[in-house]
Amino acid sequence: MAVVPDRNQPSGEPALAENDAERRRRRAQFLRELNEAKALRERVQPRRARVARMRQQMRMRTFRW
């Protein structure tokens, strides 16, 4: 794992915990926005959303472990 040095940290101390926390925060924000966009799409295009759900269910049913 490559550690990107933080400008505010002394050069000898890696900022792994802060980078990890920041990455998790950005990921959580992204997932919230993605779910919001999916919900909006379902409201705006219900038929297309239903077809997409059916396709996803079919993919999950035919998935082999």
Image (cartoon, rainbow, N blue to C red):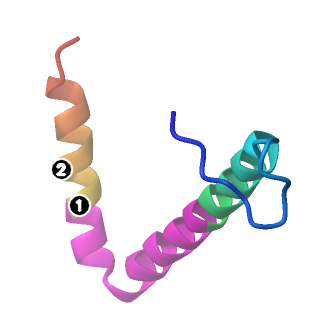
| Identity of the residue drawn at 60% across and 52% down | 4
User: In the figure, is residue 57 to the left or right of 33?
Assistant: left
| Identity of the residue drawn at 65% across and 63% down | 26
Residue occupied by mark 2? 55
Instruction: State the SS at label 2.
Output: helix
Instruction: State the SS at label 1.
Output: helix
Task: Indicate the position of residue 56 as horizontal and vertical percent values.
Answer: 25, 46
Figure check: 24 above or below 47: above
Pointer 1: residues within 10 angstroms few (<14), some, or many (20+)? few
- Amino acid type of disc 1? Ala
- Amino acid type of disc 2? Arg
User: In the figure, is residue 3 to the left or right of 57?
Assistant: right
Q: Which residues are magenta?
A: 30-51
Could you say which is closer to the camera, residue 24 or residue 63? Answer: 24
User: In the figure, is residue 18 to the left or right of 49?
Assistant: right
Could you say which is closer to the camera, residue 48 or residue 15? Answer: 15
| Identity of the residue drawn at 40% across and 75% down | 42
Report how far apart the C-alphas of labels 2 and 1 lie in the structure. Answer: 5 Å
Residue 52 is marked as 1
Q: Quadrant of residue 61?
A: top left
Q: Quadrant of residue 44?
A: bottom left
